[in-house]
Amino acid sequence: MTYTVEELVIDDSFIAYCTRTNAADIARWDDYLLKHPEALITIEEARKLVLGLRYMLQKKQNELSATDDSPEHALYVASGKYIGAFKEQPVRTRFRNWKKWAAVAACLLFLVTAGIYLPYRPGKSGTSLPTPVKTNAGSGETARSQPGERKTIFLPDSTKILLNAGTQLQVSPTFGKQDRNVYLTGEALFDVAHNKALPFIVHVAQYKIKAVGTRFNVKAYTNDRYSETSLLEGKVQILLPQGNDDVVYKTLQVNQKFVMNAPDSLSVKVAAKPEVIPLSYHDSNQNIETAWVNDLLIFENQPLLEIKNILEREYNVTIAITNSDVAHYRYTATFRHEAIEEVLKALQLSYAFSFKKDGNQITIYK
């Protein structure tokens, strides 16, 4: 027997599987997927819908509890249409009564078709994503963006560079005269001015990127597991060291990215493994690699250990994860202009964990 999305979102066992609250239900639906791999898309759509609905119900209850002491409240969803009324009752009981909210689930199918796993809302108060600051960087200078900050840099040759949070860009002392070399630690989107006589070369820890005039994104944080170069326009060459020389590993085409694992990122010594793969797209217009430029945080099946690094840079916080199981919880989610507390609360709805915030220090635990 196979199930439809509508059947799954009102199935108590499937809801427990999505919220990871019952080991027997988790095993049941993992086994179901093994027997029915063709149902993977349906399962994923229903899972997104269940978690999106759960999130919105919890958020609405929190808002109503803070503003209305009456025993009954009207329930609204994103469309603003009236859905119904419910009497005040424990959150756990209300979330388990999913059949009552089948109509709400139907209204929320847009979450699935839009590919949104956890909803986001613009214009939230509190700590938000960084706003770019414009500046110039001359030859021999070093430009830096602090955690929680973005900077737009203009080089002497009119190349435009957007630095993501927690990034350092050093410009060669002979830039524009003998070379166009820059040295990057962090992440930056390059819009390189054309100059065939002086190729533009970005130096990162394990390789170089050579361009004449093009647009590409380079991600090379020291604490990330991978370094990436994503090509948006034109062509770039990936140069790998060989002895005292550099050799061309690949010439990237548009919508390709070069990926190199960073063996020292997790204190694990492994051999470098370069590869070229297609860019990943969140929808038809937005690739995930440069979503940060549009103030989007997009996580695609990433462990919390990796998400932690991104959140630390974006929100200028320090996060400690005290439980190894929690560190390896994997999430798919999209956020925009959410405060760090809202991001963590949303992630909690998929896999349960607790956190406490003391200033800029956040501790995540089981």
Image: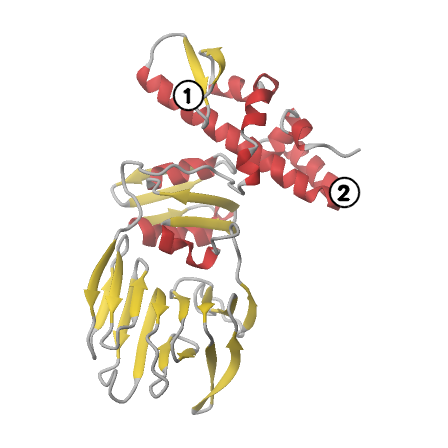
Mark 2, other Cα within 10 Å: few <14 / some 14–19 / many ≥20: few
Name the quadrant containing residue 76: top left
Left or right relative to 79: residue 2: right
Vertical placement of 85 versus 55: above or below? above
Instruction: Name the N-terminal-most of marks 1 and 2.
Output: 2
Residue 20 appears in the picture as rendered: no
Q: Nearer the viewer, residue 157 or 266?
A: 157
Q: Residue placed at 29% from the left, 45% from the top?
A: 361
- The residue where tag 1 is placed is 61
Q: Nearer the viewer, residue 92 or 179?
A: 179
Numbered label attached to residue 36: 2
Q: Residue placed at 34% from the left, 82% from the top?
A: 195
Left or right relative to 140: residue 245: right
Q: Nearer the viewer, residue 276 or 307?
A: 276
Name the quadrant containing residue 133: bottom left
How far, Cα to Cα, is label 1 from label 2?
Answer: 37 Å
**Secondary structure of the residue carrying numbered label 1:** helix
Numbered label attached to residue 133: none
Q: Amino acid at mark 2?
A: His
Q: Quadrant of the N terminus?
A: top right
- x and y percent of residue 296 in the render? 40, 49
Residue positioned most to the top: 71
- x and y percent of residue 345 in the render? 41, 35
Q: Amino acid at mark 1?
A: Gln
**Secondary structure of the residue carrying numbered label 2:** loop
Vertical placement of 354 versus 300: above or below? above
